[in-house]
Amino acid sequence: MNMFSKPRHESTELIILRYLNKRMILSEKDLLHLASLEKGYAGELIFDSWLERKLPNKFLVLSDLLLECNNTTFQIDSLVISPDPVYMFEVKNFEGDYVIKADKWYVRNGIEIQDPVLQLKRSETLLRKLLQQNGFQCTIEAYVVFVNPEFYLYQAPTNLPIIYPSQINRMLDKIKTNTLTPRERDYKLDSQLNSLHIVDSPYKRLPLYSYEQLKKGITCEKCSSFQVLYVNKLVVCTVCNHKEMAAKAVLRSVEEFRVLFPEKRISIDNIFNWCQIIDSKRTITTFLSANLHKVNHSRYTYFL
Ligand SMILES: [Zn+2]
């Protein structure tokens, strides 16, 4: 049994920003946003691997929950369901020196940042309410976990619910000592939270973009360069020399097209135009027919 009942994936927002970053010039603000999403995601993966290494499978783990309570949405990076309590973790991949002054958090060079403990408390309160509303009485223990060993916090009061990188191992050892086996309630809670999870639309936080504006073409699987050639059923990168089966490269590009333009049809013409380097529509047809479900309409054909 896998302990991650709700596994973690890159958010659609992160995936789209990665694609856009290859195909258009992003503003400074969007680039910073992309970098912070990448960093946050990397931090969450680090914490997942800690959980995987240290905790036995009987603990149920839910990642990246987006929930709503009293018309307020809140996110939980990791939730570990043990018979008692339920552990809630806000994962931070902060790097460098930070300082707390008069209850406010600053990067050491002076910029104020959002107080992660305050954010945690807010989510904890909402989760408690939500669980009560759904008939679950459980104790919640909530922590901000800093996973980056290069993180240092000056003047932190010792009573904050914070786990430092050097404490993660011991904290999980402590959780592990809970020897009770999962009860009916834990499975119920797990499936209830899974069903309450909201699928969020990322498009509202993304820069505006249009098909016309984006650079078309297949990019190298390895180095993301557009300097690739279609030779003998292969897509060959002239920058890093990486070779990929053309059919696979086309499907990879179709996936980018689908995520970037969910409203557009995956038709032969559209994909032919999107990929640029494949020499004939017949080749595109062969690749798509072999791998996607074909829908024949009286006037057009497209794929799902
Ligand atoms: Zn390359």
Image (cartoon, helix red, strand yellow):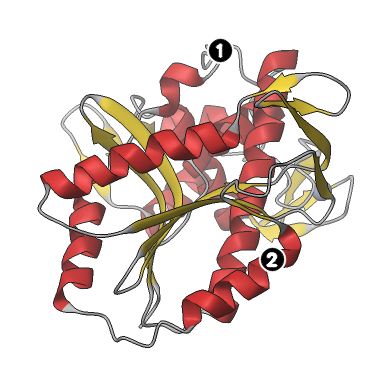
Q: Quadrant of residue 70?
A: top left
Q: Residues within 10 Å of mark 1 (few under 14, many from 20)?
A: few
Q: Quadrant of residue 6?
A: bottom left
Q: Which residue type does callout 2 highlight? A: Gln
Image x and y of residue 187, in percent? 21, 71
Q: Is residue 145 left or right of residue 287?
A: right
Image x and y of residue 128, in percent? 27, 45
Q: Which residue type does callout 1 highlight? A: Glu
In the depicted structure, whether residue 57 falls above or below residue 186: below
> Tag 1, which secondary structure?
loop
Q: Earlier in the sequence, mark 1 or mark 2?
A: 2
In the depicted structure, whether residue 143 falls above or below residue 30: below
Marks 1/2: CA–CA distance: 51 Å
In the depicted structure, whether residue 31 falls above or below residue 67: above
- For the image shown, how many numbered marks are present on the structure? 2
Q: Residues within 10 Å of mark 2 (few under 14, many from 20)?
A: some
Residue closer to the observer: 1 or 133: 133
Image x and y of residue 292, in percent? 35, 53
In the depicted structure, whether residue 185 falls above or below residue 262: below
Q: Is residue 225 left or right of residue 219?
A: right
Residue at image point 89% right, 45% down: 239
Q: Is residue 295 visible?
A: no
The numbered mark at residue 167 is 2
Residue at image point 60% right, 61% down: 47
Image x and y of residue 265, in percent? 34, 30
Residue at image point 78% right, 52% down: 236
Q: Is residue 146 visible?
A: yes
Per the image, the residue denoted by label 1 is: 212
Residue closer to the observer: 76 or 216: 76
